[in-house]
Structures are given as C-alpha cells and as structure tokens.
Amino acid sequence: MAKSASPTQIRLNKYIAECGLTSRRKADEWIDSGKVKLNGKTVYELGVRVNPKKDKVEINGKVLKAKPQNQVYIAFNKPTHVMTTLSDPEGRPTVKDYFPQLKVRLFPVGRLDWDTEGLLLMTNDGDFAQSVIHPSQEIPKTYMAKLDGQPSEAQLEKLRRGVSIPGGKVKALFVERVKKSSDKYDWVRISVAEGKNRQVRRMFEKIGFDVKKLRRVAIGALPLGALPKGSHAYITPQGLAKVFELPKWMKDPTKKRLDTRKQKKKSAKKKNVQKKTSSPRRKKSPY
Ligand code: URA
C-alpha cells in the first residue's frame, strides 16, 4: 500500500477513532503495543495511512467495521462508587451499567475517580473525545470541592500560580471559595485544564487540605445543571458548542460575588416579578 497522502487514505489512528472505538491518542497506544493488524500484518508505524474502503484493519483479532457510526454525545451525571470504564476486572459498577439499551458503543471522555461524582461526557466520536481531553485545548473542567477546612486567599493564590504534583506542574485556571457548609468546611470552585490523575485532590493536598467531596459541575461552559445522579441527556449541537466555550465565572470573575447580598435581593425581586407576570415556565435544559 502506498504511503503518500491521497484523498482516499486517512491515518490509521484517525480511522480507528472515526469508527468510534476510542480516541486517536489511545489508538496510537494500541498500534504501539501491537494490537492492530493491517491487511493481516501487525503494524507498529504510527503515521501509517489506510484506505477504509480497501484495507482490512483488525484490533485484537476483530475486524474494524468500515463505516463510521452516527455520532452520539451524552452528558451523564456519574454517581460516586462507579468506575469510569466499560468493564472492571474486580466486578465493580461501571458507567456502562447505566447504558444497557444503547446500540452504539459509547466510551467515556476522560475519567472521574471512583469517589468523584458529576458531569461525564460519553460519546462514540474519538476525535471529539481527544479534543476535550487534550491539555493543549485548555478546556476548563470545573469542580466543586468540599474541603476539610478553610483555605486563605493566599493559599488559593498558590493554586493559581501553579503547584507540582506527581505528573508535573499544574495550576488552577480559576479558583474561589463559594459557600460555607459549616463553620469548619469550605466549598471551593476550581477550574483546571490538565486532567492529571487525582489532580484536584492532589492540588488541595499541596496547600494542606483534604477533599471530602468532589463533583464536576461543568466542562467548558456546559454545566451539569439539574441532571439527576445516574441519569443522562443527549447533547444538542448548541450544547456541544458550549464545551468549547469559557464558563461565565471565567469570563469576568471580578464582577461576581463582590456583593452577594445585593445580588440575592436582586434575584428575589426578579423572581417575584416573574411570579406575578408569567405562567410557570419549564427551565430550559442546558443540553
Ligand atoms: N481531580 C480529581 O482529583 N479527581 C477527579 O475525579 C477529577 C479531577
């Protein structure tokens, strides 16, 4: 097979991703580890190009279907004590258990820890997954973290400037205290782009706090919203576009929360006006 670029040929990793099996990066790992055969021969060359109409690609002995599937994008509210994998050798619950009737093969976009809950995207579009996960895209993933104490502004500033954790230096694109759950604990909203293992927990450990609860509340500007735990919603093209936008708290963080009491009064007033002038309206889904 000729290796020069031709309109009928695409890179093997892209083809695998377009067939909805995984991301391009993961496909490269499969190629590198000898799981992929091209026309009967194991292929290790990452840049190799294929003609999906003519070439036979096998992954772990299974022939890849030539026709890419319809692309599906789902927002899922992952509960705690669920693995972000499609199977688990130890038999623990996985995200797959929540999609028993779906015909398409979905995979999770990135991962949340066993003890983290919140927004997890599921898709069969490997390229989309790659563009959300890859740190170079700088898509902020936002979390609400309940800490075992109250960080000072100086401690939060350390996170903004960057801290070293296993895997490298990471920083908060945005971080602020949001509410007091009691005198002892603080909830903190934090947005990060890197996606290192247990990143948020380790960042707070670095400034002396344990994370007692962790919930992902947004990816880009797409919020978790009111999606109940363990349920999912299909994402519209408009919802999908939000993934690549900045959330409102990162657009102008200085404007907000300077006078929350004033803000509360204002929104109570607005609600009263709405109550008087309009019939009950259903809240618009963010998806
Ligand atoms: N950071 C963590 O520590 N855990 C997650 O699940 C996600 C981000």
Image (tube, rainbow, N blue to C red):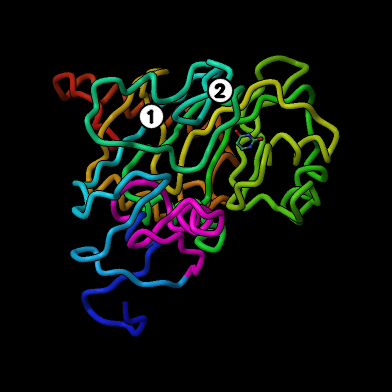
Pointer 2 or 1: first along the chain: 1
Residue 227: x and y in percent read 36, 24
Relative to residue 231, is residue 138 depicted above or below? below
Task: Give the structural element (helix, strand or loop) at label 2.
Answer: loop
Q: Specify whether residue 274 is in view.
A: no
The residue at 16%/24% (across/down) is 277
Relative to residue 149, is residue 139 depicted above or below? below
Residue 4: x and y in percent read 34, 85
Residue 233: x and y in percent read 28, 29
**Residue 20 magenta-drawn?**
yes
Residue 23: x and y in percent read 43, 52
Three-letter amino acid code of the residue under disc 2 = Pro
**Residue 245 magenta-drawn?**
no
- Name the quadrant of the C terminus: top left
Q: Specify whether residue 191 is in view.
A: yes
The residue at 32%/57% (across/down) is 57
- Left or right side of 138 for 273: left
Magenta highlight range: 18-46
Disc 1: which residue: 76
- Name the quadrant of the N terminus: bottom left
Front residue of 146/42: it is 42
Q: Residue furthest right?
A: 208
- Left or right side of 61 for 273: left
Three-letter amino acid code of the residue under disc 1 = Phe
- Quarter of the rendering containing residue 275: top left
- Picture disc at residue 89: 2
Task: Give the structural element (helix, strand or loop) at label 1.
Answer: strand
- Quarter of the rendering containing residue 246: bottom left
Q: Residues within 10 Å of mark 1 (few under 14, many from 20)?
A: many
